[in-house]
Image: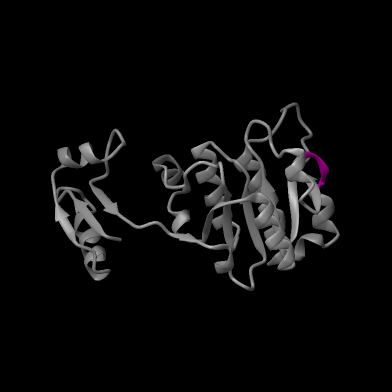
Amino acid sequence: MHAVFVDPESPEAFDIIDMAQRRGAPVQATTGRALAEMCDTVTPQGVLAVCGHLDVEPDDIPADAKLILVCARVRDPGNAGAIIRCADAFGADAVVISADSVDVYNPKVVRASVGSMFHLPLVLGVQLDMIIGDLQDRGFQVFAAEGSGEPVSQLASDGTLARPTAWVMGNEAWGLTPEDSVLCDRSVAVPIHGRAESLNLATAAAVLMYATATAQY
């Protein structure tokens, strides 16, 4: 955290100033009008923090990691933020964002993650084939999330998901390419029993990570 700008009239101002000062971040009092000029939201909340990026390298993923989520060319900022939030909620050890994906520091991604992007490592801008190979070398089973795959319930019931697992989620519109899928160990689906054509990407990721977390914890 490099600096904090606060509207003294904000209800949270004193708590924020205290927290920033304890972390050694400079605090600058400003006006609500000035904050509105700096922010991209219609109704700023009275505080703006200037922070550095939190990118990590693949080698920084914890050695004892058991659950990784890989986003392959995910373009929608709302989906990306929601996926990061789900990964945090279900105890994932890291989220990998491939090259050609949305910028995770897009304000919409940050807001949609509701703080979760600060809770777990984010590995950004990697080539999909390289990260999949790296995870497999580390002992992960890498599963492609695809509608035509075998049902996740089968993997949950036979104990497969108890092993270190990485899920690869594809683009919202076209999913994973055949070239992406063949890199993975298996294709796995969330079965749909109703009339919906598909699930939202973040919803599918939540189901898959919940099933994995249930098997691992």
Of 129 and 54, which appears nearest the observer?
Answer: 129
Q: Is residue 190 visible?
A: no
At x 71% / y 59%, what residue is drawn? 133
Note whether residue 198 is visible.
yes
Residue at image coords 67%, 60%: 213
The residue sitting at 26% across, 49% down in the picture is: 48
Which image quarter is the N terminus in? bottom left
Vertical order, 32 against 120 (above or below): above
Task: Judge whether residue 125 is colored magenta.
Answer: no
Q: Position of residue 153 (x, y in %)?
A: 80, 50
Task: Between residue 64 and residue 114, name the one nearer to us.
Answer: 64
Q: Position of residue 73 (x, y in %)?
A: 60, 41
Left or right for 181, reference 122: right
Q: Which residues are magenta?
A: 147-151
Give the prevailing secondary structure in the magenta stretch. Answer: strand
Q: Is residue 205 left or right of residue 103?
A: right
Residue 137: x, y in percent?
Answer: 73, 66
Looking at this view, name the residue that lies furthest to the bottom.
63
Rendered image quadrant of residue 93: bottom right
For the point 42% across and 42% down, the residue is 106
User: Looking at the picture, how far across and down is residue 206, in whole percent?
Assistant: 63, 48
- 98 left or right of 1 in image: right
Classify residue 185 by image quadrant: bottom right
